[in-house]
Every structure is written in C-alpha cells, then in structure tokens.
Image: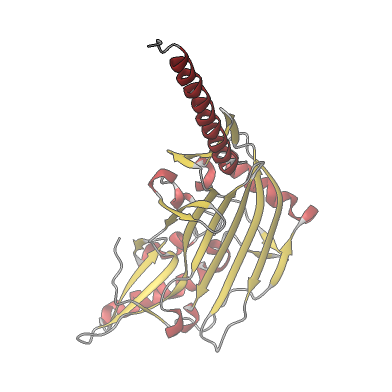
C-alpha cells in the first residue's frame, strides 16, 4: 500500500515514523544482535484518556532467562541449532509530553551462536533466522513490551471505531485506518490492533543478497541494509471534507531499518554470508612481494650463469 505524501503526524517534529533498528554484527564465534524499537504514540490527541505505561526497567541475567528462552524458541523455528545467550532487554517509556505524545522504546541485545559452519577455512553464517517472531508476552516490571496491541490498544481502538461510525453519517471527516500497513474497516479495527506485537521481524524475510551493500573502509567492514517501507502499528488518518484539506495522522507507530555487518572481504550467497575472519591480506601481499623478489634474483643468477657459459664456449680465432 502506498501512503499519501501529504500525511502529517503531529507534533511537527515527529513528521515521520521513528526508525527502529535491527543490527547484526558477525564476529568470529557468534553474531551480536542489537534491536532498538522506538514507538511513537499521539493517539491521546484523539482519545484524551489513552496513554501507554511510563516506566524504565531492565531484564538481565537470571531475570532474563525466560525471555532468552522465548527468543531462542522463535529463532530455532528458522535455525534449529541456534543458541541465544547474554540477553539484556530494557524498556524506556516516557510520560505523556504536553498531553500530546510519548515514546515507548524497547531495546534488546544478545549473542547468537550455532548458526555458523566452517567451509574451506571460511565461516558460512546463516541469516535465515532474521525474520523471527516472538509471540509470547514479555514484561519488564509488570509492563508488557511485546504484545502491545492486545495489552493497550483494544479500548482506544474501540472508541475510535465508534467515533468513525458516528462521523460517517455526517460526512464531515473521513477516516482511514492502517494496522501494520493494511487498511482495515472500523468494524475490524479492534481485532486487527490486537495483533500488533513489537518483537515481530517477519518483514525482514527478503534474502540478504537483495539488500543494499556498502563498504566502510575505516573499520574495514561490509554492510547489507534493508528498510521496511511500511509504517507498522496503528495509524488513524483524518481528512476534513473541506476542499484541499490537509490530512492529519495519529497513532502508535514505528518502522524498521535492518543491517548486517561483517569483515570487509566477506560476501553474501542468498540468505547466508561467507565471513572472512583473520584476514591476512597484508601478510599475503608481503609474501607476494618477497616471492617476486626471490624469483627475480633467481632469474638474474640463472641468466648470468647462462651468459658465462656462452662466453666460455665461444670458439677461438
């Protein structure tokens, strides 16, 4: 679905969905995964009683065991030998700002192993797992951070649906409802928003070889990037009936930008990366130079010997 370029999300400084990130860095023994989900909500401007919980908290160590197990189960549905370790999950949710908007930010870091296999001195790292989805509830201090749709949105979605049905008769404002980039009717708004969950990365299914490749010569690495163009979460667009009226948009929204980084001489094959660690290119170049000099020296010695033999065999006059 293509959304109108004229959509405006108020306040003005939040005119585009916040960029959440999915970053995977390939290391010699494991993949370091970093997830940063930045959710922006301004539904309060439509329904003044609505707000997301304001809370800062962290899951780590023994407190994160169950969550790490849920992540591992989800990833193993894509990569059966995967092992999740050292998981840390943090929630940083702001209070309502000026009765207008707030942020609900969830970050996760963990190590992922068991997805690498050695191949001719190189490592073949599977990236099939990247489109995993954690369906379970995940809570920090009693606050749900994953299934936010069913936890926080049914009430406000129901009120908005009723508002839309009432407004349709007067035809003063038209509405468009988008849930996870699908248009839904007021009748289906509640059931659709129930399915909004943050730890769902199924949008990252395209193979890595279709992602945009770039090089960074400073840390000597290669990166493949992919952006989910669709707006995720719940988005309500109101358009007044006046001519040339500007639509306004409210919602609980985010999007995802993904990247995978590996050592510079690595390359991609479908949805797997052939990672080149312990790159001895400098040593290889030095060896080539030394061998070249040695070959040149040997050639000069042989040439001199042949020349000497030719002179000795020259017939006397």
Residue 99 image point, x, y percent = 54, 87
Q: Residue 76 falls in which quadrant of the image?
A: top right
Nearer to me, 152 or 8: 8
**Image spot of residue 310 (x, y percent):** 43, 16
Point 45% across, 41% down: residue: 268
For the image shown, how many numbered marks are present on the structure?
0
Quarter of the image with the C terminus is top left
Task: Determine whether 314 is above or below 84 in the image.
Answer: above
Residue 183 x/y as whole percent = 34, 62
Q: Identify the residue at horizontal 63%, vertical 55% (top origin).
A: 137
Q: Nearer the viewer, residue 187 or 14?
A: 14
Question: Left or right: 61 with respect to 176?
Answer: right
Image position of 218 with respect to 307: above or below:
below
Displayed quadrant of residue 187: bottom left
Judging depth in this view, the residue of 117 and 101 nearest the camera is 117
211 shown above or below 168: above
Horizontal side, residue 253 vs residue 63: left or right: left
Please state, as top left, top right, bottom left or bottom right, where the N terminus lies in the image. bottom left
Relative to 207, is 243 above or below?
below
* Residue placed furthest toward the front: 317
Work out whether residue 168 or residue 94 is closer to the camera in this orientation and state it: 94
In the picture provided, is 303 more to the left or to the right than 147? left
């Amino acid at each position: 679905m293509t959304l109108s370029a004229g959509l405006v999300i108020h306040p003005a400084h939040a005119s585009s969905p916040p960029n959440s990130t999915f970053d995977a860095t390939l290391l010699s023994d494991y993949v370091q995964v970093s997830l940063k989900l930045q959710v922006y909500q301004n539904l309060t401007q439509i329904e003044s009683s609505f707000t997301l919980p304001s809370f800062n908290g962290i899951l780590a160590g023994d407190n994160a065991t169950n969550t790490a197990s849920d992540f591992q189960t989800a990833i193993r549905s894509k990569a059966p030998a995967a092992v999740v370790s050292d998981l840390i999950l943090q929630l940083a949710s702001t209070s309502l700002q000026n009765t207008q908007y707030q942020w609900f930010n969830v970050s996760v870091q963990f190590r992922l192993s068991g997805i690498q296999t050695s191949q001719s001195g190189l490592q073949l790292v599977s990236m099939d797992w990247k489109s995993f989805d954690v369906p379970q509830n995940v809570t920090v201090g009693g606050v749900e951070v994953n299934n936010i749709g069913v936890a926080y949105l049914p009430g406000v979605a129901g009120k908005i649906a009723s508002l839309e049905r009432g407004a349709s008769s007067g035809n003063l404002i038209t509405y468009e409802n988008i849930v996870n980039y699908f248009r839904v009717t007021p009748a289906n708004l509640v059931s659709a928003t129930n399915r909004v969950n943050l730890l769902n990365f199924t949008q990252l299914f395209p193979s890595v070889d279709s992602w945009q490749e770039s090089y960074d010569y400073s840390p000597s690495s290669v990166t493949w990037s992919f952006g989910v163009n669709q707006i995720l979460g719940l988005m309500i667009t109101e358009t007044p009936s006046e001519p040339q009226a500007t639509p306004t948009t409210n919602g609980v929204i985010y999007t995802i930008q993904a990247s995978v980084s590996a050592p510079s001489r690595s390359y991609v094959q479908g949805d797997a990366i052939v990672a080149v660690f312990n790159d001895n290119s400098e040593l290889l170049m030095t060896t080539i130079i030394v061998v070249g000099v040695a070959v040149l020296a040997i050639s000069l010695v042989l040439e001199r010997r042949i020349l000497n033999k030719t002179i000795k065999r020259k017939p006397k006059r």
